[in-house]
Image: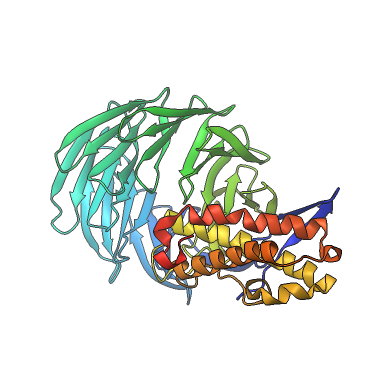
Amino acid sequence: MAKVFYRWVLLVGCLCVWSGSFAQTSPKFLFSLPANHAVTRVIWSPSDALVAAASGNEVRVWDVATGTLLHQLTHASTVKSILFSPTEEALLSSSQDQTAVLWDLSDGKQLHSLKFISSVEAIAFNEDGSLIAVGSNDKTGKVVEVATWDTLLEFTHQDWVTQVRFIPGTTKLASSSYDKTVKILNYQTKKEERILTGTAYIKSMDVSSDGKYLAGSGYDKTIQVWEVETGKTLYTFTHKATVNQIQFSPTDNLLISASNDKTAQVWDLATGKPLIAHTHGDYVNQVQFSPDGAAVLSTGYDRKVILWDITTGKEIHQFQYPNTVYGFAFSHDQSRFATAGDFQSVYFYESGLFTLNMSNKKTSQDILLTWHLRDLEKLRLVLLQNLKALNAPDFVELGCIYGDSFDFSNQGNLSEESCRVVDCLHSLKKFFKETPWNQQYMNYEIETTLNGMLDFEPKILARPVMFTSSCAP
């Protein structure tokens, strides 16, 4: 178990625990990889073994472990977007040369291409990598089957296609446009199922991981959140300036936005209210949740990349660059991140966040449960520290307090680990009910921490799909 780094402060009798605390160490620079031009996009492959970067008219693909340049994939003009396939066998790129190209990552050769009559920026893979979607500034788009290169669907807008997203668990595609609409298209039935109408050009669009919700933002300072199935507008959020990017959290309960009003704003999708914001010195152009949803990276024209805590908004670390930062990307295990900008290199950093186990794919409920276990473990350590300091012998019988740490870093079977946590919480309740408690050991810090631990039981048990019958209350 990695050492937990946490801070606590006692204010007027209140023990407050917060993080930088979910970070194991401070972020630190690792290395850089060179490019010939400014780097406008950087992405990690699904296994985190490869990194690709768009620089000028080329895409560079490196082996991260060795820093070896594996491929230089060349377009005739500036590359706009890049994506690894979910299988990591191919890379899809789009360009101002009016093409989208699928590249074979075994040899760097071109497998297929699609030709349009204007620049191409919007690209997407479906969940298993069997389909791609492409949208162009010529107001058209396509869904294509990768294996046969057959076109399954052609669609049009009244203006540029800005983004395309496959809707998870369905045969549907969402396509946004400067014509102020998001179209919900069924590539199996080849029908346009619904048109979601925005209030301005839709610049950024995202779909929740469960496929239930869609959000779009535009140049009129607003963000709209729709229910995909009904087309109902659930919320309209407002910034003070243009919204450049939006993203759902991994647990789908939050939305974050980057705006020219110099803020990165987190919105609570349970209440429809702003939750927390972080301010930059200039326009904010990109934001990204960490894969466990506990932290955020944001950057803007102030040439800073800031890593901050989603719970408190507190800054964990900031990186100042001499030139504009165009983007960044967390590795999927969140142990590292890479930055891209007007400095002809890709910079790599150790994030300092807890490393996630990528041996199997985690659901949003897994991630949320892991988050709860992590916070519960921090409380356990605070409790243990106080009890040992006060020499409270009765608690020695509670092995879950004095014993092994809870595994909150996705390193084992979450169902079994959650059962162990629930058993511990039940033991705490039983201890207080049946054991005469010597009041000389009780203080406000211990009582508050214990109550905080017990508060986690309903949060954990709220996910019955994670538990076996032997763990049920």
Residue occupying image coordinates x 45% and y 55%: 463
In the rendered structure, the answer to whether residue 357 lies left or right of residue 133 reads: right
Colour convention: rainbow
- Residue projecting furthest to the top: 199
Residue 70 image point, x, y percent: 38, 71
In this view, 357 is above or below 36:
below
Counting from the top left corner in percent of width and height, residue 87 is at: 30, 65
Quick one: 22 or 93, which is closer to the camera? 22
Quarter of the image that includes the N terminus: bottom right
**417 or 191, which is in the foreground?**
417
Q: How many marks?
A: 0
Q: Residue at x 54, y 46 (%)?
A: 287
Residue placed most toward the observer, 96 or 271: 271
Whether residue 32 is visible: no
Q: Is residue 74 left or right of residue 186?
A: right
Q: Is 23 placed left or right of 419 in the picture?
A: right
Relative to residue 68, is residue 44 depicted above or below? above
Residue 77 visible in this rendered orientation of the protein: yes
* Residue located 34% across and 61% down the image: 73
Q: Which x, y percent locates residue 289?
A: 52, 51
Residue 142 x, y percent position in the rendering: 21, 42
